Structures are given as C-alpha cells and as structure tokens.
Amino acid sequence: MKHYTLRDLDKKYDMELKKVVKEVKKKKPKLVLLQFPDGLKPYATAVVDYLEEETKAEYLIWLGSCFGACDFPTGLEYLKPKIDLMVQFGHSALMPSY
C-alpha cells in the first residue's frame, strides 16, 4: 500500500492547509473533524500529521461518505468527546494542477 505524503498532494491540489491552520489557531478547538471526498481520503493521514504539527488540536477523520457540502455527517452531536470544529475538503474548487 502506497504511503501518500503532502508533497504528493501538493503536486495535484491546493488544499489551503495554511488557511485551515489559521482558522484552528483562531478558534482554538480541542477536537476537529476532517471530512474528505473519496479521492482525497488517501491523503487524510498526511493532512492530519501536518495539522497536528502546526496546531494544538486533535483530529478525527470522517470515513463515511462525502459527496459535497450538503453531505454533512449525522449523529455528531452524540459523540463524546464533543467535536469543536469540522473542516470539509472538496474537489470542486480544487481542480488538479497538472
């Protein structure tokens, strides 16, 4: 199984991770949920590694479906500990750069 890195991701997409870091630092959440569409899920752990290095938050990766902004995970209000912030990544504005 291939290990995907941020370098691999940056070659294809601009994930605006610096913007995510800025928002996390501003809002100071303890627990952040990251939601990726299937095409970006192979990069999810590399994104989490980067964000954990840059912020003090902990991160969860949503492995359920994500077919657009309206595909919001249900039942999050029942999770313990509580999720303080959710970041949803998508493809539409992230067209490949190759």
Image: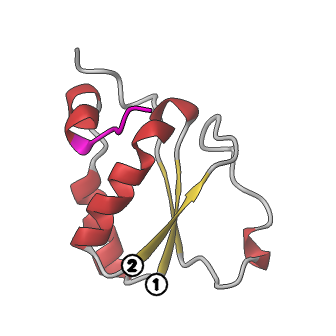
Place of residue 4 in the rendered image (x, y in percent of width and height, measured from the top left): 33, 38
* Lateral position of residue 61 relative to residue 66, left or right: left
**Observer-nearest residue: 23 or 12?**
12
Location of mark 1 (residue): 30
Place of residue 91 in the rendered image (x, y in percent of width and height, measured from the top left): 45, 30
* Lateral position of residue 46 relative to residue 35, left or right: left
* Lateral position of residue 70 relative to residue 31, left or right: right
**Residue at 64% in and 40% down:** 66
Quadrant housing residue 52: bottom left
Q: Main secondary structure of the magenta part?
A: loop
- Does residue 36 lie above or below 85 as drawn? above
- Does the magenta segment cover residue 3? yes
Instruction: Give, as a single range, the part of the protein colored magenta.
Output: 1-6
Quadrant location of the N terminus in the rendered image:
top left
Quadrant housing residue 25: bottom left
Mark 1 and mark 2 in contact? Answer it, CB < 8 Å: yes
Callout 1: helix, strand or loop? loop
Q: Which mark is residue 57?
A: 2
Amino acid type of the residue that numbered disc 2 sits on in the rendered structure: Ala
Q: How many marks?
A: 2
Callout 2: helix, strand or loop? loop
- Does residue 25 lie above or below 98 as drawn? below
**Observer-nearest residue: 3 or 15?**
3
Quadrant location of the C terminus in the rendered image:
top left
- Does residue 4 lie above or below 78 as drawn? above
**Residue at 65% in and 34% down:** 67
